[in-house]
Amino acid sequence: MKNGETTFVYVDHLLAEHRRLDGLIRRTLATFPKWEEADSTAWLPRLLVGLESIRDELAHHFREEEQGGCLEEAVAHCPALSAEVQQIEGEHQLLLGEIDGLIHRCRSATPQNFAEMQAIETEMRRLVRQLRSHEARENAVLQRGFGVCLDGEDMANGRSQVPR
């Protein structure tokens, strides 16, 4: 296998995981009702299912990274990325703890408490921003480590561009 093909395998794998996680996040965010029309609590169990799916996906994704996945290969290509990868991997337990806390909060929430439900949505959106920032840092490591361009169109199509 040529080096460019190997690069595609690593980069495309991580991008596919990011797309899968993004889909879970979007579906979970879509469970929140329009609060001015909210008269049902049926959305809370769907939110919990979504959060648990996101948590499972994240745990798998992080475990793969920590066991020598794409980021480690990027460091092998560019050792200067080592400290950045250590920082990224150091965030894993914090992010899992954040989502665990949100899951616990949802399980103990009073669905009829409008303010509490809005606070949960705010917390979820804050967590999503953290996850997207984390993902952007992973993508930056891939770009520098493999010398690829991950522009918006290619990422949306699940394909990276390896320079010739």
Image: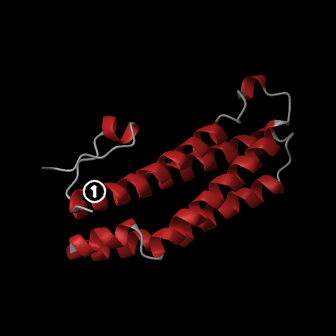
State the residue position of label 1: 5
Q: Is residue 137 visible?
A: no
Outermost residue, left side: 164
Residue drawn at 31 percent across, 54 percent down: 8
- Residue 11: x and y in percent read 35, 56
Q: Amino acid at mark 1?
A: Glu
Q: Position of residue 79 (x, y in %)?
A: 22, 76
Q: Splitting the image into 4 quarters, where does residue 142 fall? A: bottom left
Which SS class for mark 1?
helix
Res 33 quadrant in image = top right
Rendered location of residue 7, percent (x, y): 28, 59
Determine the residue located farthest toward the front in the rendered image. Answer: 1
- Asked if residue 41 can be seen in this view, the reply is yes
| For residue 112, above or below residue 40 | below
Q: Is residue 56 above or below residue 163?
A: below
Out of 13 and 37, give the one closest to the viewer: 13
* Drawn side of residue 130 relative to residue 24, left or right: left
User: How is the rendered protein coloured?
Assistant: secondary structure
In the rendered image, the quadrant that contains the N terminus is bottom left
Question: Residue drawn 46% across and 49% down?
Answer: 16
* Count of numbered circles on the image: 1
Taking 4 as reference, is 28 left or right?
right
